[in-house]
Amino acid sequence: MELHITCIPGDGIGPEIIAEAKKVLEKTASVYGHKIIFEDILMGGASIDVHGVPLTEEAVAKAKAADAVLMGSIGGDTTTSPWYKLPPNLRPEAGLLAIRKALNLFANLRPAVLYDELAGACPLKEEISKAGFDMMIMRELTGGLYFGERKTFEENGVMKAVDTLTYDENEIRRIAIKGFDIAMKRRKKVTSVDKANVLDSSRLWRKVVEEVAKDYPEVKLEHMLVDNCAMQLVKDPAQFDVILTENMFGDILSDEASMVTGSIGMLASASLNDSKFGLYEPSHGSAPDIAGKDIANPIATVLSAAMMLRYSFDLDREADAIERAVKQVLTDGYRTGDIYSQGCEKVGCSKMGDLLAERIR
Ligand code: NAD
Ligand code: IPM
Ligand code: MN
């Protein structure tokens, strides 16, 4: 099979982790008899530096023309990088939000799984980490606060800023349907997370999720308030199967869930629309504090590439091979610094990519 993949290396550790994901994909393609055609595009700070904008129309067109997009990460240090002196619509993150919207990527799947081998890197009590967990965070990605009207203005001599959180029922329904569909292939439980005790948008969310649930009698639905969910994630993560939630809650809860898997460097993601097309990226950012040092963990990006093979290309065997290689490398005792524990061998980003590629079979 010929796979046309557009890559967005991006900023910070982005180019380092994308190089390792490409290594693993190339090896997978050679073992399983496929041909991959990669094309890189600029986005975020890298695009600002060349074109003055975080995303060009040409880049969007190239992304659309591919079968799937594999992304590293974008952005810089938000307190020191000159990119953050630009107007908000010209900053790196605006490029990421624009591509999500342009490609209608409303469903963001973030699987948080604790590998047995990483129980020691999980910051929770031993009886919790020993039990393990395997959840899918289903985050709505093209609505809510991220895309509502916002403004900063002066009123009666006082500065004010407004961000609006808007959802319509159709936006809620389509992500809920995806959430229940995924739950049917898993342990058939959906925890819908909202703030319905305060927000109108959450009350609509709950109502629409209840309606969708009627079509999935086998799936157990529960509602949970977001503050409680943040607490339950560290108290008893094994209770969760699918967490279904709006854009900003999902952003925050997924970073929290990532750390209980050992590190944010382990959390993959897929951003999907209603077609086979998707954008795949680790859930973490550009980690400016460790960029250029060859110490970033490339596993989240490699696992995102596996999700790409599974969801956009239906190459389940190949995706399984990548996931097995990740497990094997951990069993063999290799760790990047973020997931290191005593007795293991510490390796850099590039070496981790080599070790993963070697284990593809
Ligand atoms: P971050 O996720 O980049 O980093 C948070 C912490 O986690 C840092 O200490 C970092 O070193 C560590 N970390 C992250 N990924 C790692 C990896 N693969 N291996 C080892 N350690 C890792 O979040 P931040 O510092 O809040 O944001 C930095 C920049 O990234 C900002 O400009 C932000 O807007 C951007 N960002 C981009 C994305 C994206 O591209 N999807 C996601 C989140 C943040
Ligand atoms: C993520 C990031 C982005 C988000 C930022 C960089 C806009 O944090 O992908 O989780 O908030 O969606
Ligand atoms: Mn985030």
Image (cartoon, helix red, strand yellow):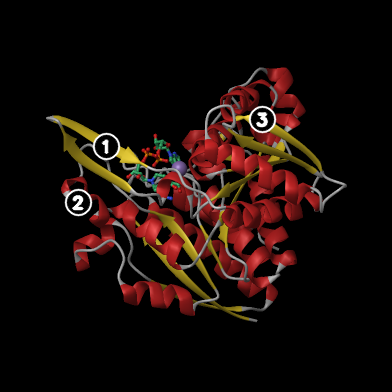
Residue 49 visible in the current orientation: yes
For residue 87, the mark is 2
Of residues 204 and 78, the one nearer the viewer is 204
Q: Secondary structure at mark 2?
A: loop
Q: Is residue 116 above or below residue 107?
A: above
Q: How many marks?
A: 3
- Marks 2 and 3 sit apart, C-alpha to C-alpha, by 37 Å
Ligand 1 placement by image quarter: top left
Q: Is mark 1 within 8 Å of ligand 2?
A: no
Q: Residues within 10 Å of mark 3 (few under 14, many from 20)?
A: some
Taking 146 as reference, is 55 left or right?
left
> Residue 130's image quarter?
top right
> In the image, what residue occupies the spot 56% across and 44% down?
267
Disc 3 marks which residue? 224
Check disc 1 and report the residue beneath it: 161
In the displayed structure image, the side of residue 27 where residue 12 appears, left or right: left
First in sequence: mark 2 or mark 3?
2
Q: Position of residue 45 (x, y in %)?
A: 27, 56
Where does the image place residue 328, in percent across and percent down from the top left?
A: 69, 47
> Which residue is located at x 45 percent, y 54 percent?
17
